[in-house]
Amino acid sequence: MVGFGGKQAWLAVRQGPEAGPESVIAALGLRDLGTVPWRDGIDLAHLTDDRVAVTPPLTGARDELWVLATGRWLLRPDISVDVVELSTVLATEVQFFATHRVTELHRWQRAAAGELIRTFGYVGQTGEVTSWHGEPDPAERDAGLPGVLDEETTVLVGEKDVLTVANAWSIDPTTLTGRAAPGPLRIGAADGES
């Protein structure tokens, strides 16, 4: 396998009867272009704005199987990934992570059964917390978040913190490199692209 994570966005979808790789591609409204080798798929997702690489189910947190979907397409400002809607459509837990160390943009969201559990967003260039819903869990507290956000609170979050939360909730995708692949990646393409 080939890892990813820096300057990237990804979804972690707990596998279920309605939440395999093909279902994730369909729920995102992408065309399934089929399978590709890991290196090619990760490179394509990282270097283009219209492709998403989707993993086969991978063992992660809580010994659950997780399908990861990654690509710059998920970072586009004109694309809105709704984890609540995806968790309803796929009938499972859905998480969203994004980190971009140039602008110090760091975000994570978590939804299950059509309910938003947690969301956090931060832009380091301005020091602004852009979203905050729900209570930080132990993984977030370990990453340095305060228990309560108020005007007196200073927040400082970096890329490693996003990966720490991802590891606790599902999978830190930077740890995939060198592990045996349970299958090839699938590539999804945005409408109108080939």
Image: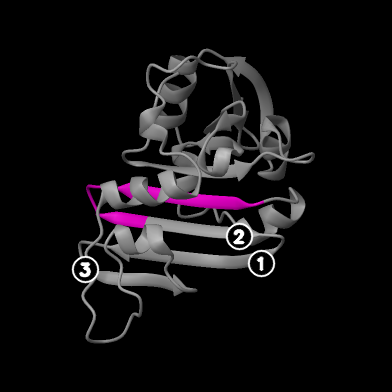
What residue is shown with label 2? 111
Q: CA separation, marks 3 and 2? A: 27 Å
Q: Secondary structure at mark 1?
A: strand
- Identify which amino acid the numbered label 3 is placed on: Thr
Q: Earlier in the sequence, mark 3 or mark 2?
A: 2
User: Looking at the picture, does residue 30 appear above or below residue 112?
Assistant: above
Pick out the residue farthest to the front.
63
Query: Which colour style is shown?
Result: one colour
Q: Which residue range is magenta in the image?
A: 93-106
- Which numbered circle lies on residue 126? 3
Q: Secondary structure at mark 2?
A: strand
Kindly identify the residue that appears in the image at 55 percent across and 44 percent down.
Answer: 62
- Which numbered circle lies on residue 115? 1
Badge 2 crowding class, 10 Å Cα cut-off, few under 14, some 14 to 19, many 20 or more, is: many
> Looking at the figure, which quarter contains the N terminus?
top left
Kindly identify the residue that appears in the image at 40 percent across and 62 percent down.
Answer: 138
- Identify which amino acid the numbered label 1 is placed on: Glu
